[in-house]
Amino acid sequence: MALQSPEQRIWWNEPLTKVEVTWITISFVWGLIMFFAMIYWHLTGEQNLSNETYQITPDRFAERTEAMADQYTVREEGDTGIPVVHPPPGSDIYMLGRLWEWWPVLELELDKEYRLHLASVDWQHGFSLQPTNINLQVHPGYEMVVTMRPNELGQFDVVCNEFCGVGHHTMVGRIYVVEPSAEPVSSGEPAASDAAGEN
Amino acid sequence: MASAANFRTCPDTGLKVDRTAEALIKANAVVAVVFLAVGGLFGVLVAMTRWPAVHLLDADMFYLVLTAHGADVLLFWILFFEVAILYFASAILLNSRLATPKFAWLAFIMMVVGAVMANVAVLQGDSTVMFTSYVPMKAEPHFYLGLIIFAVGALIALFVFFATLVVAKNEKTYEGSVPLVTFGAITAAIIAVFTIASGAVILIPTWLWSMGFIANIDTLLYKIIWWGMGHSSQQINVAAHVAVWYCIAAMVLGAKPLSEKVSRTAFLLYILFLQLASAHHLLVEPGVSSEWKIFNTSYAMYLAVLGSMIHGLSVPGAIEAAQRRRGFTHGIFEWLRKAPWGNPAFSGMFMSLVMFGFLGGISGVVMGTEQINLIIHNTLYVPGHFHATVVAGTTLTFMAVTYLVVPLIFRREIILPGMAKWQPYIFGIGVAGISLFMMGAGTLGVARRHWDITFTDAIMSVEVPGTAFLMMGLNGISALLAGVGGAMYVVIVVGSVLFGKRRDEAVAKANPIIFDGGAAVANYGSEEQVKVPGTIVLVAIFFTAFVLYYFVNWKFLSEVWPLS
């Protein structure tokens, strides 16, 4: 029994049965498949995180976000006073998390790439894009850059899914995805950003 | 020396029982059940608030209660019970005295003081930081101090356990290798040392920071090390509850492991690889490379998963072999149909095995895949997963073994046996519901740790699919069911300990609970000669479900916005 010492003192020399060998082999191979699947997806899949991160002070990140908003604001979101920003495709776009909002509202064009910069200016937050359900952790002091290509039209909500105090459940933001505008705003090439690299 | 210890001989097993060890097992188990009762009640309140139609607590109270729920059931209930298991697996199973009983009592007192202090801090209202207490969110200093005192107490208990192993070896209280259950307990204890060390490395500076002695704690560093404690502590549970599965199967059915070598190798894989899982919480973080994520999240090519998959064959295999030896040899599943389903120790254990594998295990591996985590991180899917591993896995197993601990250690008969028979089913079905419906809601994007999915107070409206509301309601109903099952457990256990009929020699003879009387088991060891076709079918079903669910989630991932 499992409650007593093994019957055979030299238990480590027991031969394995066929059932055990088969199952261990299947399990081991399955483990390898799952391991290499992650690497394979980095090579061929379309949903991967870049490893691009910068350390940044909250003030500096807020400045950059505001600079983008100043330049590309197209309207206000209802009567909230929050700007809706329509940056050119291919550009560096910013969304900051703070107690308790995602700022600003972004308006993006369908099937265009953007370099999204995410950071918090106070506590940790969870960037959760709904209903598509993309979830990223957002830290203060770290700026994450991920290239994003919206592939469906409509209104998307950003909620916070990392607990951030009593107002956590009121922390929301928004991203609109619209048809590309008639005249090309920029080349459409993902701009090798000069802003991002120098943090 | 040995003569200093005061032993009794157990009428059920014939084992020599050190009365000090017995008293410590009782004390730790009793306190564990108190924390389960308190923490479980908090859990029901959380689920009643997340049920949109009920929405019981206000926001402040909800987050406070959620913080307390995590600490009380994830940490305190489980660790007190695990200390009891460690003393049982060392002193009792090895026929030994417990080493340094004074330190064991010191450990117990420190754990109680620390756990109470952390609870007081949370209930005072200024330490609503969740179980994870991510910086720069700050709790009161005595919140961290309580956790530190608790952890140091647990560390002392671990050293008492290791010292007892040395004493037993030196005093030759057993022959050959330690029993498999003890081996599993050693696995849990080794992982626990790593866990507590990680906790000390991060909680002590955080405590100093909360008092103003340290200016800044890096948020990413905090998370990496904190999860060295937070996730590894759940791996202690896995090792401990798998050891208890073997223990219950052996006690109730006289089951022997199919192969000592295979089962022990599986535990060894836990020791070597389980602790890498801190990475599971960092898969969508900035500042951590993909290489680091892939290696760590997969426990170095899924070698710890391999350990669990091996136990997934050898635990039911041991049960099938024991049942077939008793004559249940018709067809593939007679052994399972005629298993002692009316014995709560067995039914609880077997349900735990199935739910841990199918719900907890598969979901854990899938969400721990680097890229798939993008569509799961911090949604309700995460608590859905760990309620399957920790509640259906660990808590249900510990409940099941209590039906053996009360008669064997407390020497009391179980009161209300009719109710005890139903308890694991009611609790188990409730937990299965909690787990499945939270995973379902998470798949629909519902956030974890969130007071209001209607977003009434938010500046912009957020649309949440109607199905998510249905899921949260079903989760609430399941939580009520689990709450009833938990309350039944507490009533039965407390009632039995206080008012149960004393289990003297005559009672023990009339109502044996250990298969074959234990002492009569002269022929033990491996059982590789018996065929186990039923287990092969079960394992094949499990594997098929695993593979299908895994690839379905890659499909889900491939449909979201391209990211690079």
Image (spheres, rainbow, N blue to C red):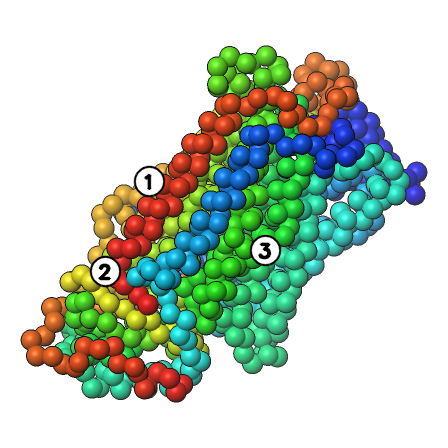
Residues B114 and B223: in front is: B223
Specify the quadrant of the image occupied by residue A79: bottom left
Q: Which quadrant of the view contains residue A111?
A: bottom left
- B159 is higher (above) or lower (below) than A134: above
Mark 3 or mark 1, whichever is nearer to me: 3
**Tags 3 and 1 both on a single chain:** yes
Q: Which residue is mark 3?
A: B275
Q: How many marks?
A: 3
Of all chains, the one bearing label 1 is B
What x and y, as percent, mark residue A114?
Answer: 25, 74
**Mark 2 belongs to chain:** B
Distance from disc 2 to disc 1, alpha carbons, whole Å, reads 22 Å
In the drawing, what numbered circle is on residue B156?
none
Please say whether residue B279 is visible from this viewpoint: yes
What amino acid is labelled 3 in the image? Answer: Gln
Which amino acid lies under the numbered mark 2 shown in the image of this protein?
A: Val
Query: Neighbour class for label 3 at 10 Å: few (<14), some, many (≥20)?
Result: many
Q: Residue at x 85, y 36 (%)?
A: B173
Q: Which residue is mark 2?
A: B462
How many angstroms separate mark 3 from mark 1 (CA)?
34 Å
Q: Position of residue A14 (x, y in %)?
A: 70, 32
Q: Are marks 2 and 1 on the same chain?
A: yes
Q: Amino acid at mark 1?
A: Leu
- Secondary structure beneath disc 1? helix
Q: Which residue is mark 1?
A: B474
- Badge 2 local density, few (<14 within 10 Å), some, or many (20+)? many
Q: Residue at x 65, y 46 (%)?
A: B268
Q: Quadrant of the C terminus of chain A?
A: bottom left
Q: Quick check: can you spot residue B36?
A: no
Instruction: Pinpoint the chain carrying mark 3.
Output: B
